[in-house]
Image (cartoon, rainbow, N blue to C red):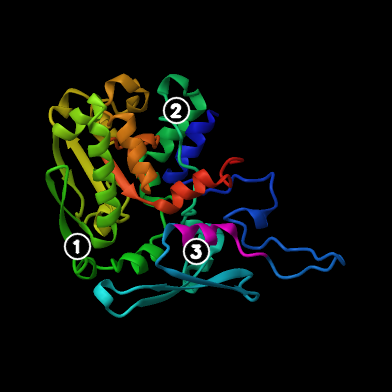
Amino acid sequence: MNIRIFCCLVLLGFPAFFCTASPAADKPDGTSALAVSSGGNISRPQEPAGIAIMRRAYPDVAFLASYDSAADDWRISITVPGADGGEPRHGELYWCEGRMLPADRLADRDDYWSMMYRYAEEVPDPAEFTEEDIARIRMVSSPEHRQNGPSSPQFFYDLLYDCATREQVEEHITQVSFLGKRSNLHARIAGPLARVEEEILAAAETDAEVRDFAETLASADSYNWREISDSGNRSFHSMGIAIDVLPEGWGTKNIYWAWRRDIDPENWMLLPLDRRWMPPARVIEIFEDNGFLWGGKWTIWDNMHFEYRPEVVLYTRSGYAAGN
């Protein structure tokens, strides 16, 4: 199978358990690899490297990890600073190979995939798809799989963004201007998005393609309390940490897989790349450098979509994902 396709399918229900060449203790998802002392005695496991990645991704959040021998896993006490000097939020989750689950969900681990996965470096090209790739994409994009397959665990995000309910998250929604367009989003990502805007405007001074993107942006919508189409899972728009950028005149090209599927149910995934709208490569790079993923690199593509997932960017760039 094309490796880029395999990596992208993680989002669609295939947990990130790819590393096999390195000792599990050296991988972000290695929760029960045992360290061996010089005398040959087995000692307690080493802390998974993925916890350090979480600390780097969210430097203002405290992650206190301790090994729970009864659960054979790492228990993480998390403290999120309160907004505007308010009371901090506290929670406890188990690492569970990067899923970050509460104790009462550990038995249901197969219902979730890891938060850590290898984000694609390039856009998967349908011209390189094998028959196996196509069959797998059809399977994971089916309504049945999207409803009943593994889903993204949201327990950490509920704690981080205080977004378990609509009423909670709307206490943190703020309005910002992005490239001249108003957008309502979670206050925690206002800073990263402002840095994206600053870098895009700087690049636009010398890059005509970036300048055209900035000047022809029609909308930049973020917060929207809703479920992901076909899946029943909450969208990252429901947390206010995803933003959809739509250009003027985008309708001349395809921008979202499900809209293309409505036209071509069997072969939407084979649509050539030159028939999809895409932001300039420099714009995508700027978003990624500031912790955002671009949905155009997913096999089930959403080319207008960026979401703030710095842990995935750091994991992919850390070298731990290199063997995946």
Query: Where's residue 105, x and y in %?
Result: 47, 68
Q: CA distance from mark 1 to mark 2?
A: 39 Å
Is residue 131 visible in the rendered structure shown here? yes
67 in relation to 5, above or below: below
Say which label, 2 or 3, has the lower sequence index.
3
Is residue 150 something one can see in this rendering? Answer: no
Q: Nearer the viewer, residue 105 or 241?
A: 241
**Amino acid tagged 1:** Ile
Taking the spot 53% from the left edge, 60% from the top edge, the residue there is 52
Label 3 is placed on what type of residue? Asp
Of mark 1 and mark 2, the one earlier in the sequence is 2
Residue hosting label 1: 173
Locate residue 43: give its quadrant.
bottom right
Please, what is the three-letter code of the amino acid marked with disc 2? Ile
Q: Residue at x 28, y 21 (%)?
A: 275
Where in the figure is residue 162, as x and y percent of width and height?
30, 69
- Point out the residue furthest to the right here: 39
The answer to whether 135 is drawn above or below residue 144 in the figure is above
Q: Quadrant of residue 89?
A: bottom left
- Region rendered in magenta: 46-56
The numbered dot on residue 115 is none
> Gap between marks 2 and 3, in whole Å?
29 Å
Q: Which element type, helix, strand or loop, lies under badge 2? A: helix
Residue behind mark 3: 108
Mark 1 → mark 3, Cα distance in angstroms = 32 Å
| Residue 83 on image: x %, y % | 27, 72
Disc 2 designates what residue? 134
